């Protein structure tokens, strides 16, 4: 007994009934493009009650019943459909196509696959199979929006520009209109409007300018901001527009927007409502339903975090600016009493010199030593106040006031070395180089930088040792290199030593005060020079200051 292969055993009528009742839409076109077959699902897809009604409709009228769009929401010409391309002899893989029926909300999405039926090598029929992926497409769009929104919202220094970019992201994938309002100084201010058509966007901006939102009107943005509860409006009837309109002209403009559905979600961060985002569907047929609430509120929370972060950053910068302004004023005011103290110390020294032999020698020597120490301490404090003033000026973004003049670099370096040698007897601090090197620069600022570098060399050479200030010159520039044999800088951190507030991992127990390397480099660069560093951890560091001979 011979077994027959498994296969279809029904009649042609039964096969047609199976295709007619198939869940996925199926259509067949002949070689001219005329529709010769459609099942029940295909008829429903384009708004017909039966396949016969669909087949009886001329193809041009059939196409006019709906709008075709591609995956990005752009209009898709009928000639770009897979079936049309197969009829032209093109190899066409599956394509995702959106269908918007005239007069009906929403968009249906399908994967369309066109398969040719050949006869003698020519296309006789094209079978079009449609797989509904509306739900999957909506999920994909939302995941893409959340991913792209994360990248946009991470750049939240200027939250107004960021929210405008976010509004433009959700249009047209999620809405025809996107408007963002934020609360500023207890007032609601509109800071972002997006629509694919620039003229429409200008229309909304003009509408808001001519007919500002009534803060006491019920519903809408104000209510969402006050309650922190999102509002979903699946359908916007004309009665709602009439209730919102302030007069007949306002009503006409509102109708011109073509609003069909809307959703208003609060922007909430740290328990505070910072504003609201409004999404609206119009000509594209976007419709918002209750099941969209969670996703839209998630998007609103992400936007709110960006606004909150940007505001916190702005407040922090403003606090730093106020601090630096205070430091600048305080440093300036401290100079007057310091100068008075120094003047009195110098006057006492001169009077001591004039006292002659009337005062006992031991008393004169002790008094002179005390006065010398007081003068040194006052000069050191005055230098620190100058550092503080320069740092405050630089951190507030302002240039320091320079006092340029000719001076001897060797003499300045020697003075700094001698000052530190007297307070660091465990180190040997020397100056090496020519007998004299002339430079036209700001002596006070240069000595502060050099003082800071030598102080660091002493601090970071806790076991003592030699510190050398090497002075050099060429035709266009002069330089001083401060070399020590201390703990050095870790190689991975060498490029970061000039960053503000940086402290090396091997000096965490050492505290500093003064200009700092960041401020020192900023001063030298303002003088037209450069400050660089080389180091070997455990063997010491070299900081090189290079200045032009003449100011640029």
Image (cartoon, grey):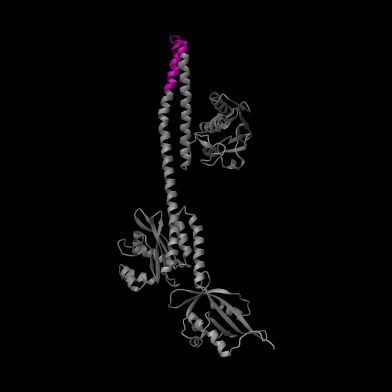
Q: Quadrant of the N terminus?
A: bottom right
Asked whether 70 falls inside the magenta stretch, the response is no
Which residue is most to the front?
A: 1
Q: Quadrant of residue 424?
A: top right
Instruction: Give the answer, above or below, for where 481 lies relative to 24.
Output: above
Q: Quadrant of the C terminus?
A: top right
Which residue is most to the top?
A: 357
What is the magenta segment's predominant secondary structure? helix
Does residue 81 appear left or right of residue 342 in this picture? right
Q: Is residue 481 visible?
A: no
Q: Quadrant of residue 469?
A: top right
Give the residue drawn at x 49%, y 65%: 142
Query: Foreground residue, 437 or 233?
Result: 233
Does residue 273 appear left or right of residue 196 in this picture? left
Q: Position of residue 283 (x, y in %)?
A: 44, 72
Specify start and end residues of the magenta stretch as a single range.
344-363
Asked whether 353 falls inside the magenta stretch, the response is yes
Q: Position of residue 98 (x, y in %)?
A: 51, 74
Disc count in the image?
Answer: 0
Instruction: Give the answer, above or below, for where 458 lies relative to 37.
Output: above
Q: Position of residue 366 (x, y in %)?
A: 47, 15
Does residue 85 appear left or right of residue 197 in this picture? right
Q: Quadrant of residue 259?
A: bottom left
Instruction: Give the answer, above or below, for where 265 lies relative to 395.
Output: below
Query: Foreground residue, 412 or 228?
Result: 228
Q: Is residue 92 visible?
A: yes
């Amino acid at each position: 007994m011979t077994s027959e292969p498994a296969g279809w055993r029904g009649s042609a009528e039964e096969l047609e009934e199976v295709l007619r009742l198939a869940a996925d839409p199926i259509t067949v076109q002949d070689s001219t493009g005329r529709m010769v077959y459609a099942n029940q699902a295909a008829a429903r897809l384009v708004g017909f009650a039966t396949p016969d009604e669909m087949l009886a409709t001329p193809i041009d009228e059939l196409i006019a019943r709906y709008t075709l769009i591609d995956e990005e929401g752009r209009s898709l010409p009928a000639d770009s459909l897979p079936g049309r391309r197969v009829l032209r002899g093109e190899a066409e893989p599956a394509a995702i196509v959106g269908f918007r029926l005239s007069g009906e909300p929403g968009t249906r999405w399908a994967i369309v696959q066109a398969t040719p039926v050949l006869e003698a090598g020519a296309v006789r029929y094209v079978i079009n199979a449609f797989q509904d992926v509306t739900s999957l497409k909506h999920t994909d769009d939302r995941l893409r929006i959340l991913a792209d929104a994360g990248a946009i919202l991470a750049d939240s220094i200027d939250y107004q520009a960021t929210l405008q970019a976010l509004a433009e992201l959700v249009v047209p994938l999620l809405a025809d209109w996107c408007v963002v309002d934020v609360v500023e100084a207890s007032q609601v201010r509109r800071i972002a409007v997006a629509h694919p058509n620039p003229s429409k966007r200008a229309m909304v901006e003009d509408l808001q300018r001519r007919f500002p939102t009534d803060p006491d009107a019920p519903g809408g943005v104000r209510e969402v901001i006050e309650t922190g509860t999102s509002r979903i409006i699946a359908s916007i009837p004309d009665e709602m527009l009439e209730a919102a309109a302030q007069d007949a002209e306002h009503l006409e403009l509102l109708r011109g927007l073509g609003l069909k559905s809307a959703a208003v979600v609060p922007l909430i961060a740290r328990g505070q409502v910072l504003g609201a985002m409004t999404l609206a569907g119009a000509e594209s047929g976007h419709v918002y339903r209750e099941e969209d609430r969670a996703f839209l509120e998630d998007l609103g929370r992400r936007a709110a975090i960006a606004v909150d972060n940007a505001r916190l950053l702005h407040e922090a910068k403003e606090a730093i600016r106020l601090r630096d302004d205070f430091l600048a004023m305080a440093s300036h005011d401290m100079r007057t009493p310091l100068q008075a103290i120094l003047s009195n110390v110098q006057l006492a020294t001169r009077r001591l010199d004039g006292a002659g032999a009337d005062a006992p020698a031991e008393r004169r020597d002790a008094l002179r030593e005390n006065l010398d120490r007081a003068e040194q301490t006052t000069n050191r404090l005055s230098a620190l106040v100058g550092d503080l003033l320069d740092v405050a000026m630089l951190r507030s973004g302002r240039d320091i006031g320079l006092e340029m003049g000719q001076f001897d670099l060797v003499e300045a370096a020697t003075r700094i070395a001698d000052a530190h040698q007297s307070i660091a007897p465990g180190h040997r601090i020397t100056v090496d180089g020519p007998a004299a090197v002339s430079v036209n620069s700001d002596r006070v600022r240069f000595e502060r930088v050099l003082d800071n570098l030598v102080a660091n060399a002493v601090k970071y050479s806790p076991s003592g040792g030699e510190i050398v200030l090497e002075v050099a010159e060429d035709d266009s520039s002069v330089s001083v290199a401060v070399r020590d044999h201390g703990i050095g800088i870790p190689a991975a951190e060498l490029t970061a030593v000039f960053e503000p507030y940086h402290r090396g991992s091997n000096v965490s127990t050492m505290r500093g005060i003064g200009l700092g390397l960041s401020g020192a480099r900023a001063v030298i660069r303002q003088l037209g020079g450069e400050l660089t560093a080389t180091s070997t951890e455990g063997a010491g560091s070299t900081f090189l200051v290079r200045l032009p001979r003449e100011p640029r």
